[in-house]
Amino acid sequence: MSVTIGGTTQPYDAPAGVSAKTFPLRAGTASASVTRSSAVVAKVVSPYAISAPPYVQDLHYRAASSER
């Protein structure tokens, strides 16, 4: 899979099954895509922009889904 945050793309070889991985936060947009055999099988783009500095410290979690 690959994760793009604030214009920086980072690859990640996810293990089989359920797993979690954190990435450094940068200002801009966030997206992730999962590729299998050179084909994108799932992709999600967060509808929430990341700002620096934040106007208000917001401790709520945000989620987005590829609906796959």
Image (tube, grey):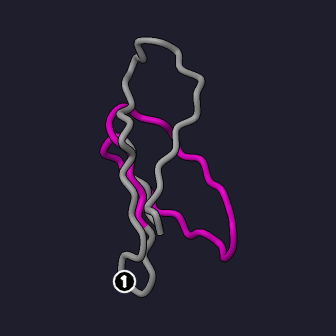
- Choose between 68 and 11: the one closer to the eye: 68
Residue 14 is covered by the magenta coloring: yes
Outermost residue to the bottom: 37
Q: Residue furthest top?
A: 56
Q: Is residue 29 above or below residue 35?
A: above
- Residue at 47% across, 49% down: 64
For the point 52% across and 63% down, the residue is: 12
Residue 37: % across, % down: 42, 87
Q: Residue at x 66, y 76 (%)?
A: 16
Snapshot quadrant of residue 49: top left
53 left or right of 20 in image: left
Give the structural element (helix, strand or loop) at label 1: loop
In the image, 63: left or right of 3? Answer: right
Hey, what amino acid is under mark 1? Ser
What span is colored magenta in the figure? Answer: 6-33
Residue 49 visible, this angle: yes
Tag 1 residue: 38
Residue 14 horizontal/vertical position (percent): 59, 69
8, above or below 36, in the image? above
Q: Is residue 45 magenta?
A: no
Q: Quadrant of residue 42?
A: bottom left
Give how far across and how far down residue 56 sits, in percent: 47, 12
Asked whether the viewer can see residue 9, the reply is no
- Residue 4: x and y in percent read 38, 51
Left or right for 9, reference 65: left
Identify the residue shown where x is 40% and y is 12%. 55
